[in-house]
Image (tube, grey):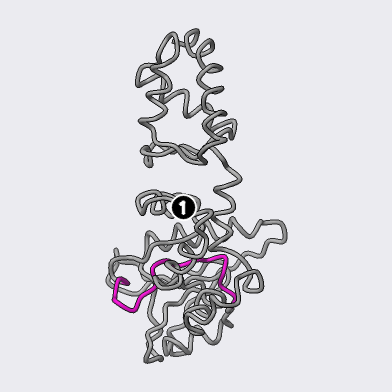
Amino acid sequence: MEYRLSVEIYPAGKHLQEKKKELPIISKEEIRQISLETPLPLDEKELELFLKYHHEIRALVYFEDLPNYIVLDTQWLADAFKCIVTADKFRPGQGRRLGTKAWADLNDKGLLHSQVLEYIIKTNKHIFKFEKELNDYILNIMEKFDIIIRPNKSDAAEDSPKYYVPCMVKTRPELINIYEMFKVANDNKSAWLCFEFNFLPQHLINHLIASLSREYEKLQNILTVTKRKLLFSKVSLCLSINRNKQDYKKCL
């Protein structure tokens, strides 16, 4: 099989480069058909290895758990990410008319509401120019890269955000404010073990917050009427769902 792949990987790759000029994204079924047109078609196992290899050398983007589509143009994918994750000054002015609070939630709190996401997709048709299924695939990749976080089922109220975007959060709490939020008595305060690093990249912190958010429920601020989720810049407070008592997790 290794010999067959070493011979066939180049003609199939050439076909994909030609396709890349037409479309930035392609279905796995289309790649399967391209393979069948080569002198020695790849079987399913070889095709999987072919895609994994090209993913490893960053020639395309392919995930086994998101197998229906393959991104051929990685720059196009990066541009799609930038449509959602970008500084406010780079967004079209008319977009903020959609609702000042909705945009402020995204730019300051990292809360991406459905109406804002729909507007971003609608006004960036040169990027999101496909059917809903493909647009959803792009969002799934953003989840895969921990750029956005889908709310837990317990968060899924009508007014809850469509996604959380950790790298967009600007608000940072003080330690004393966290105690006040939950009315923690002085004799019940626990010790905080904090590590400070000067060399850790920002995206690593976002990956950590995303990982913890999937494992734990985000706590609600019991002092506010709006029950705002406690997601801050480089900090996420979570509730362990495996224990009877509250177990606060802080990501620094």
Identified at 71% across, 56% down, the residue is: 199
Identified at 53% across, 16% down, the residue is: 11
The total of numbered circles placed on residues is 1
Identified at 34% across, 79% down, the residue is: 159
Q: Horizontal and vertical percent for residue 155?
A: 32, 72
Q: Amino acid at mark 1?
A: Lys
Name the one closer to the observer, 222 or 160.
160
Q: Horizontal and vertical percent for residue 100?
A: 51, 84
Tell me the crowding category of disc 1: few under 14, some 14 to 19, or many 20 or more residues within 10 angstroms, Cα based. Answer: few
Please tell me whether residue 230 belongs to the stretch shown in magenta. no
Q: Is residue 93 left or right of residue 122?
A: right
Q: Is residue 94 above or below residue 198?
A: below
Name the one closer to the observer, 180 or 173.
173
Residue lying at the far right of the rendered structure = 198
Q: Quadrant of residue 252?
A: bottom right
Q: Secondary structure at mark 1?
A: loop
Name the one closer to the observer, 179 or 163.
163
Q: Is residue 38 above or below residue 157?
A: above
Q: Is residue 79 left or right of residue 50?
A: right
Name the one closer to the observer, 134 or 109.
134
Q: Is residue 137 above or below residue 14?
A: below
Q: Quadrant of residue 47?
A: top left
The magenta stretch is 155-170
Magenta stretch secondary structure, dominant: loop
Task: Check the picture and name the quadrant holding the N terminus.
Answer: top left
Q: Is residue 93 left or right of residue 165?
A: right
Please tell me whether residue 160 belongs to the stretch shown in magenta. yes
Q: Horizontal and vertical percent for residue 226?
A: 38, 88
Residue that carries the numbered disc 1 in the rendered image: 129
